[in-house]
Structure formats: structure tokens, C-alpha cells
Image (cartoon, rainbow, N blue to C red):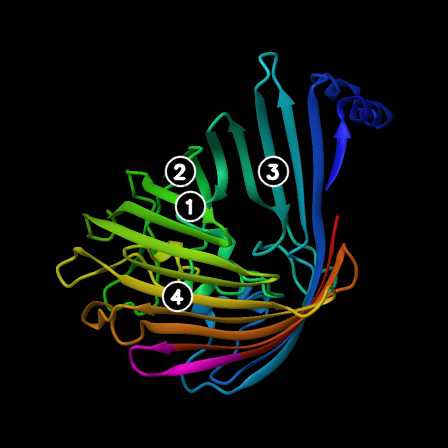
Amino acid sequence: MQRLTTALLASTLVAGGLASMANASAETEYSYGGYIKVDAMISRTDSGSLPSGSIGRDFYIPGLTPVGDGASNTYTDFHARETRFFFRAVQTLENGEQITGYIELDSLGTPGGDKRITNSYSPRVRHAFIQYRNWMVGQYWSNFQDVTIIPEAPDFVGAPDGIVFNRQPQVRYTMANGWSFSVEAPETTITPNMGGTGRVTTGDTAMPDLTARYQTKVNNVHYSVAALVRRLEYRQDGVSDTVNGYGINLSTKIDIGEHDIRAGFVHGEGIGRYVGLNSVNDAVVDDILNLDTLGYTGFTLAYRHVWSEKYRTNFIITRGMFDDKREYTGINANDHTQRIAANLMYQVNEKLVVGAEISRANRELLSGDDGNLDRLQFSVMYSF
């Protein structure tokens, strides 16, 4: 991470013809940083193909593993879309308090590019928030999530099947004793009646999602307990109903010298868009056009072993399991998804890391049809 004082930034802006932007307070500190990451993947699916341009070719998406009786296929992909940049401004006010603004961008998951000639992709906003006193307002990780247990991996998420993974706009209040509370942007994803893995994103929800989380660290053990309460709404296509959703997320990271264990358990009804990268929806439309919540239970376990200053290994298993509501979803809805992975990370120097990972992912439907995704992934990441 690089830092610029206001005086240096002002001279830089003047040299660039942007002197009008240099009227910031002398007590403002700017910093920037990020990383450049290049990924190469060889993937094999045994029950169909991931089409060219699918986001599942850029990183692992549990709900996209092909299933059924399709032919197997093998393909190689290269990309640098995870490359990331952030900019932070911290200003000290006249009363001595500080206010912080932060924005972070990458190009992962955005449309507009192709692999034919230029491989150009649009940037996206990952985080954009303001911090003042105990308040944070803007887009950031959901307060229902614990980022501490995300394992180190060449894959973007590493263990998406069994963890909470969600970024969205919110208003959060964090207390010094480890408690935090948030009001977050609502959205409802619906499976149509007998719609299998079909999805309707309603945009109808009126009440914000509400979360509470407590986290602390005792000696070498970090742990977090989070709760989520939400309202699911659908008022289209002849349906006009509202139902409650809830979830609980338990997670821990245990440091064992230089090594660590990361574990998480999450369970709930109507929390689909928070877990498994939305491998299950929040609710399904029943036979009388009312909503019935879809349940989810997930776990993840990762062990990180540090062999030396240069080498370390991560072993990962993660699984998401979904309630059987086949009377409403049909038998083509997901029953479970799972990923097992092992990687070797080589620390070339303090700024450069090379990684290699082998993994097998599995998705099974309520019908019993399933499919595997085997992937060998290499990555090179330079942090600045």
C-alpha cells in the first residue's frame, strides 16, 4: 500500500493539469494499493460443458457445475480479471476526529469482454464506503459474513459452497466491545413453481435486511456469531405474498503457531442469496401461489500448514445442503453442492506469490443426477 501526503498529491495534480482538485485539507492522507493477479485454469466437466463466457470459467460457482448425461469436456482459460485497485482518503477534522472514504475496483464477473482479440472487461465497484466514528455507510461485506474464515486459495472464493459471501450497500454501527449491527439492502430470489433451479429476482422487498454480529479473539482463537432477519416479498405473475427468513452463522479461526484451522457453520430459512453464491433461492412459489422458504445448511473447514517462509499448503472442504421441497420446486432443484481442494502457495518474495491448486466440485439434483468439475489452477499475484 502506497501513501501520499496532501502536499505531494497537490504537486502531482498540478503537474497533471488538475490543480483545482488539490484544495484538500493539509490533514488529509491518501493511500492506494491492490494487486495484479493472473490465473490459468484447466477444467474438466464430466456431465456437460460450461459455455465460453460463463462466469464459472473465471472462478468456481457451485450452482453452475454441469449435471446430467451431457458429454465430458476439457478446456483451458487464462485471465487477469481479479486484478484489484483501491484508493483511501483519511481526513482529520478540526476537532481531531477522522473521516474515511474508501473505494475498491476489479473486473471479475462483469460483462462486455470476450476472449477473441482484446480480452477487455469493464471494471466494477467491489467496495465503496464512508467511515465516521462508529458508523460505516456504503457498500461492503455483509455484517452477516465473517471474512476471517475465507481460506487462502488461487480460486477467488475458495470455499463458496458452505459460507456466507455477500457484498452490498448498508448502514452499520460497530461497538468497541465486539458487537456490530447493520441495516442492509434487501432483495428476494424466487424459484417458480416446479421451476427447478430457475430464478426470479423480484425487486419487491420493502423491509431492509437486519443483522447482528459479535466477534472477538481469545488468545489464539477468533470466533464470530452472526444472525440475520429478513422479509421476502413477491408481487408479480399472480403472486402477492410475504414470508419471513432468518439465519445464523457461526465461524472460527484457530491459530496453531504458524498454522491455522478455519471453520464455519451456517443455517437458515430464506437466506439463499447470502450463501453458496446463491446456489439455492430464498423461497419457492407453492401450489396456491404463496411463498415457502427454502432452507440451507452449510459448513466449511480449511487447514493451513506453513512449511517454511517460502511454502505453505491449504486443504479445503466445503458443502452446501438444501431442503427437499420437490413438491414445489420439482426434482431438478439442487440437493447439495460440494468442493474439495488442496493447494500449494510459494512466496517468491514479500510481494509476489505463486499458487497451484487442484480441486473437485460436485453438484447433485433432487432427481439424483449429478456432475463433477475437476480443475487445476495456477495463479501469480503481485501486491503493491
The residue at which mark 1 appears reads as 215
Quadrant where the N terminus sits is: top right
Frontmost of labels 2 and 3 is 2
Identify residue type, mark 1: Gln
Q: Furthest residue to the left?
A: 288
The residue at which mark 3 appears reads as 103
Label whose residue precedes the other's in the sequence (3 or 1) = 3
The residue at which mark 4 appears reads as 299
Helix, strand, or loop for circle 1?
strand
Frontmost of labels 3 and 1 is 1
Q: Is residue 321 left or right of residue 303?
A: left
Q: Quadrant of residue 320?
A: bottom left
Q: Position of residue 302 (x, y in %)?
A: 50, 67
Q: Tell whether position 368 is magenta.
A: yes
- Which residue is located at x 46 percent, y 70 percent? 64
Is the residue 372 above or below the residue 273 in the image?
A: below
Q: Quadrant of residue 39?
A: bottom right
Mark pair 2, 3: CA separation: 22 Å
Q: Quadrant of residue 43?
A: bottom right
Dots 2 and 1: beta carbons under 8 Å?
A: yes
- Which residue is located at x 58 percent, y 75 percent? 342
The residue at which mark 2 appears reads as 180
Mark pair 4, 2: CA separation: 23 Å
Q: Is residue 276 left or right of residue 26?
A: left
Helix, strand, or loop for circle 2?
strand
Identify residue type, mark 2: Ser
Label whose residue precedes the other's in the sequence (4 or 1) = 1
Residues in magenta, as a range:
364-373
Frontmost of labels 4 and 1 is 1
Label whose residue precedes the other's in the sequence (2 or 1) = 2
Identify residue type, mark 3: Ile
Dots 4 and 1: beta carbons under 8 Å?
A: no
